Amino acid sequence: MRLPLLLSTLAMTLMLGACGNTVEQRIGGAAVGAGTGAVVAGPVGAVVGGAAGAVTGPSVARATRRATR
């Protein structure tokens, strides 16, 4: 049961990471989101957190850069 979930999470992270202009930000956001989601809600939280982190990663990075200038 865990292997298909892990493989689907990995595949979704890679697909979402490749669709943006800044792959590093998307993959980093997905990793942070998946880790946080896993701690809070287990495997389902990891999938949802990974997707949310991949989608919002670049905007969070831009906002952080603007705030530190």
Image: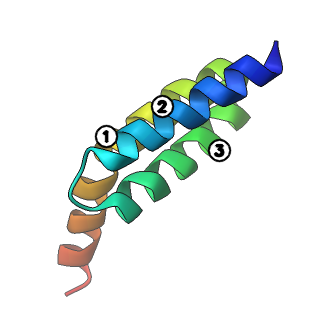
Q: Secondary structure at mark 2?
A: helix
Q: Secondary structure at mark 1?
A: helix
Who comes first in sequence, dot 3 or dot 1? Answer: 3
In the image, farthest residue toward the top = 1
Dot 1, crowdedness within 10 Å: few (<14), some or many (≥20)? Answer: many
Instruction: Establish if 44 lies above or below 15.
Output: above
Q: Where residue 1 appears, x then y in whole percent?
A: 82, 12
Instruction: Establish if 34 lies above or below 58.
Output: above
Residue type at tag 2: Met
Residue type at tag 3: Gly
Q: Is residue 23 left or right of residue 8?
A: left
Q: Where residue 37 appears, x then y in whole percent?
A: 60, 34
* Residue identifier under label 1: 55
Quadrant housing residue 44: top right
Q: CA distance from mark 2 to mark 3?
A: 15 Å
Q: Nearer the viewer, residue 68 or 28?
A: 28
Give the residue displayed 47% in from the left and 43% down from the top.
Answer: 14
Q: Where residue 35 appears, x then y in whole percent?
A: 65, 44
* Residue identifier under label 2: 12
Dot 3, crowdedness within 10 Å: few (<14), some or many (≥20)? Answer: some
Quadrant housing residue 47: top right
Q: CA distance from mark 2 to mark 1?
A: 12 Å
Q: Secondary structure at mark 3?
A: helix
Q: Nearer the viewer, residue 30 or 67?
A: 30
Instruction: Establish if 50 lies above or below 59.
Output: above
Q: Nearer the viewer, residue 4 or 42?
A: 4
Give the residue displayed 59% in from the left and 24% down from the top.
Answer: 8
* Residue identifier under label 3: 35
Residue type at tag 1: Val
Q: CA distance from mark 3 to mark 1?
A: 15 Å
Q: Nearer the viewer, mark 2 or mark 1?
A: 2
